[in-house]
Amino acid sequence: MARVFLVGAGPGDPELLTLKAARLLRDADVVLHDSLVGPAILELVPPAAEIIDVGKRCGKASTAQADICRLLVEAALTRKKVIRLKGGDPSIFGRLTEEIEALRQAHIEFEIIPGITAASAAAATLQASLTQRHVARTLHIITGHGAEQGLPAHNWAALAQAGGTLAVYMGSKYLPWLVKKLLAEGMSSETPAVSIEWASRPEQRIIHASLARMPEALMQAAPSGPVLLLIGLAFRDS
């Protein structure tokens, strides 16, 4: 019977894979993976298995989501164990819904395997809490890059006034506009901010700056990998 495992690869460090994810990879027949999944994780896949890169990266050539869904269904109908390997956690900005719908329409069984998301890995690296008592009672996870291109139409006033931790995924491209939105809605220009590129991987880079200064600091760093931005008082001493 056709079956697909939608697996979270975590932030990149293979030791942060769940035991279940590692076990499934070692027994896979075909793996369709994101471009953010590093070679150290793919080394767990058996040599005889087929590995297909279906990565999607902002500003770079990538596989259309419709093609990913088609490949996933085709692989499931011809292979015993198919792994759809996604960076981080599949349910957080991982286009999980589209692939679930495609599998359901094809009457293919599937299972979702959670993974450690980048915000958790970044906080661990910084030795900080995302929800520090008395400082950050809320955690907001948002994307800085909308499906329609440009900055998403979030409720910026609510985010600026929430007073907790703001974790911005895919926020580097439109960071200057994001910061302007938050400042215009009343967030202090001196609010601590941290950008983490390639969280948990050997090439990880961390930049500390105030919210107002972060766009320039990040531009000077010229990141080439995925960047997570953490904003809030919880990071003033990190």
Image: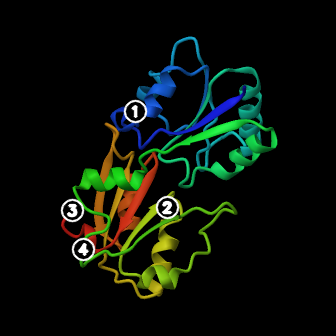
Callout 4: few (<14), some (14-19), or many (20+) C-alpha neighbours within 10 Å? few
Figure quadrant of residue 109: top right
Q: Which residue is mark 2?
A: 171
Mark 4 — residue?
Answer: 133
Q: Position of residue 211 (x, y in %)?
A: 35, 73
Q: Which residue type carries mark 2?
A: Gly
Q: Quadrant of residue 67?
A: top right
Q: Quadrant of the C terminus?
A: bottom left
* CA distance separating discs 4 and 3: 15 Å
* Tag shown at residue 238: 3
Farthest front residue in view: 1
Q: Is residue 1 above or below residue 124?
A: above
Residue placed most toward the observer, 37 or 211: 37
Q: Is residue 2 left or right of residue 137?
A: right
Q: To which residue does mark 1 refer?
A: 19
Q: Residues within 10 Å of mark 1 (few under 14, many from 20)?
A: few
Above-or-below relation of 214 to 137: above
Of marks 2 and 4, the one in the foreground? 4
**Image height check: is 198 above or below 152?**
above
Q: In the displayed structure, does residue 83 sit left or right of residue 208?
A: right
Q: Nearer the viewer, residue 27 or 194?
A: 27
For the point 31% across and 68% down, the residue is: 131
Question: Where residue 223 is drawn, which disc sits there?
Answer: none
Q: Is residue 73 left or right of residue 90?
A: right
Q: CA distance from mark 2 to mark 4?
A: 26 Å
Helix, strand or loop at mark 4: loop
Q: Nearer the viewer, residue 160 or 79?
A: 79
User: Do tag 3 and tag 2 residues touch (Cβ < 8 Å)?
Assistant: no
